[in-house]
Image: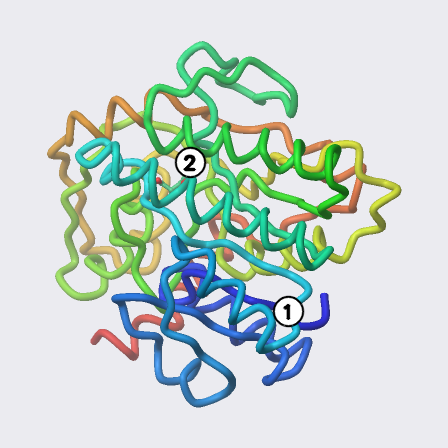
């Protein structure tokens, strides 16, 4: 990657990915784009930014040309829970931004990163140690758009030689920008509420296991995959990647070790619960280990220590 365009840079991943990439590749080499949500000041002040709509291919192409972009990272997405209340909008945003990225990469002979998700799996997928290659019949519009994007990524690689790569991200836990509209959002909110109010009402029920990952691992996995030797990649779109699997009781118990008065209660959101029940409990990420050396650094214990260390002074 030399000159990188990050679409959706104001979101949960984008607001940390842009500074991370600028540190590695240089401030002027990473162009951050956004539409309605403003970028964080650190991004606005440290390098090029463009206010543009990723659904407008002509404008995206002009920006790509202006900065001599060779790699497009498309983080534009309507997530799983919101997608169920606005399915046609979710489909349009998720698919049009994907197609525009692939079409423009084809023109410039560039590379594309497409994030997929545990949401690409469905209720008929094996739930435990979910294999890399398995049955994928998701029951959310978000998941359907992710499977379609994975297939399109492979199609553009095979048909046009576009160097498209992707990761099936689990729930991502972070402390800069809150996620919005996802099913795994509870695992971020719980830290904020534990610090601010010493209590949290969880919208997923006890025993709901899901894969999760701390943001530093998510950022590193993206760069490691994009820089991996292409001749080693048997799977391009997309690799299972995970760092930990837990249920609400386990994360609450870990937080309680640091905040003994913390209490969690449950008020299950039926839409989110149905989505979570259709997703894997834990994924097998051995293909990512074998093909490009994936290895997570954080587990539930070390992530909790780090989240509380960073958030406590900010929120107290
Ligand atoms: C969501 O919950 O929708 C996302 C995801 C796992 O893709 N965080």
The outermost residue toward the right is 231
Question: To which residue does mark 2 refer?
Answer: 246
The image shows residue 58, relative to residue 244, as above or below, that is below
Q: Position of residue 35 (x, y in %)?
A: 31, 66
The image shows residue 220, relative to residue 250, as above or below, that is below
The image shows residue 204, relative to residue 35, as above or below, that is above
Secondary structure at numbered mark 2: strand
- Asked if residue 149 lies left or right of residue 190, the reply is right
> Residue at the spot x=57%, y=33% of the render?
150
| Quarter of the rendering occupied by the C terminus | bottom left
Query: How far is disc 2 from disc 1 in space, using C-alphas?
Result: 39 Å
The image shows residue 278, relative to residue 97, as above or below, that is above
Q: Position of residue 175 (x, y in %)?
A: 37, 65
Tell me the tag on residue 69. Answer: 1
Marked residue nearer the N-terminal end (2 or 1): 1
Q: Position of residue 229 (x, y in %)?
A: 85, 50
């Amino acid at each position: 990657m030399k000159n990188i365009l990050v679409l959706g840079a104001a979101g949960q991943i984008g607001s940390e990915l842009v500074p991370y990439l600028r540190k590695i590749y240089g401030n002027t080499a990473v162009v951050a784009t956004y539409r309605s949500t403003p970028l964080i000041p650190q991004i606005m002040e440290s390098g090029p930014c463009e206010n543009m709509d990723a659904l407008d291919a002509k404008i995206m192409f002009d920006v790509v040309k202006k900065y001599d972009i060779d790699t497009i990272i498309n983080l534009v997405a309507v997530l799983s829970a919101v997608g169920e209340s606005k399915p046609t909008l979710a489909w349009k945003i998720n698919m049009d931004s994907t197609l525009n990225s692939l079409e423009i990469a084809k023109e410039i002979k560039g590379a594309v990163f497409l994030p997929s998700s545990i949401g690409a799996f469905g209720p008929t997928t094996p739930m435990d140690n979910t294999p890399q290659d398995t049955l994928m019949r998701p029951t959310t519009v978000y998941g359907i758009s992710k499977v379609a994007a994975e297939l399109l990524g492979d199609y553009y690689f095979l048909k046009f030689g576009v160097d498209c790569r992707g990761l099936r991200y689990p729930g991502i836990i972070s402390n800069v920008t809150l996620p919005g509209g996802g099913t795994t959002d509870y695992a971020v909110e719980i830290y904020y509420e534990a610090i601010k109010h010493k209590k949290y009402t969880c919208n997923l029920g006890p025993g709901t296991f899901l894969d999760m990952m701390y943001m530093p691992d998510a950022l590193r996995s993206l760069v490691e995959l994009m820089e991996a030797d292409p001749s080693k990649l048997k799977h391009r779109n997309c690799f299972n990647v995970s760092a930990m699997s837990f249920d609400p009781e386990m994360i609450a118990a870990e937080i309680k070790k640091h905040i003994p008065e913390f209490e969690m209660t449950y008020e299950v959101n039926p839409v989110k619960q149905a989505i979570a029940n259709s997703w894997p409990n834990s994924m097998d990420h051995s293909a990512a280990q074998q093909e490009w050396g994936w290895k997570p650094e954080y587990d539930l214990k070390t992530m909790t220590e780090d989240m509380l260390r960073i958030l406590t002074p900010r929120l107290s």
